[in-house]
Amino acid sequence: MNTITTTQLRDAFRDAILAIVPTFEPLSSIRWSYCPSKRKGGRAQLQGLGTRSFDIMIRGGRPGHTWVGGHGESYVASLAIATAYCDIEPEILDHLLLADAVDLRKALYMLRDPVLSGFVGFGTGDEFVIRNELVDDNANVYLEFTNMIWWNQATDTY
């Protein structure tokens, strides 16, 4: 298996998300929009951006101690797809988030090796968990779709 870097992973994830055609019918015309942003308190700063504006954060990479060989070894990190939703009616929010989580899982799951050589996949369960959800008085939402990712990291150790 080839090795891959976290910047290559981020770029591949970004491209796959941008290609998603949203399945949640009431908002299917609103596509995903990549918005690299500053961080504050560990969160991406996406306030004031449109629905499905997102940034990608790969946090806390460390050796996975699962395999070693070739030119690398297993690494694991937390993947967070920070996402903004603007002016979303409360009665559809949960349905929208579920549909978007399914769309993200389908798009990113397809990238596993050999499609994206060196990307092994997700942690157990493959599902995305919603974390750090913030909702303001104007029905604007910030949240992070999170999962663990595994990849083959180039190291000089072996």
Image: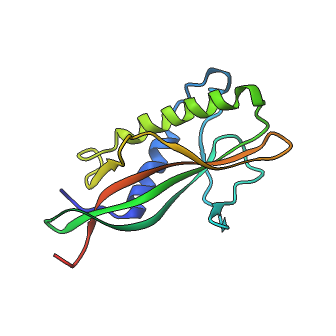
* Most foreground residue, 78 or 87: 78
138 lies above or below 90: below
Q: Note whether residue 140 is visible.
A: yes
Quarter that holds the N terminus: bottom left
* As drawn, 131 above or below 106: below
Observer-nearest of 147 and 119 = 147
In this picture, residue 140 sits left or right of residue 113: right
Front residue of 153 and 16: 153
Q: Residue at x 44, y 37 (%)?
A: 105
At x 56%, y 34%, the residue is 100
Q: Quadrant of residue 155?
A: bottom left
* Residue 29 in view (yes/no): no
Q: Position of residue 146 (x, y in %)?
A: 51, 49
Residue sitting farthest toward the bottom: 156
Q: Residue furthest left?
A: 70
Which residue is painted at 25% across and 47% down in the image?
Answer: 113
**Picture coordinates of residue 77, whole percent (x, y):** 41, 61
The image quadrant where one finds the C terminus is bottom left
Query: Residue 11 at x, y = what percent?
Result: 44, 55
Compared with 98, 12 (above or below) is below
Q: How many marks?
A: 0
Query: In the rendered view, how is the structure colored?
Result: rainbow
Give the left or right position of residue 37, taking residue 18 as reference: right
- Image side of residue 118 versus residue 149, left or right: left
Q: Give the image location of residue 56, x and y in percent.
A: 53, 55
The image shows residue 80, relative to residue 17, as above or below, that is below
| Residue at screen point 64% across, 41% down | 52
User: Among all residues in the image, which is located at the extreme top?
Assistant: 25
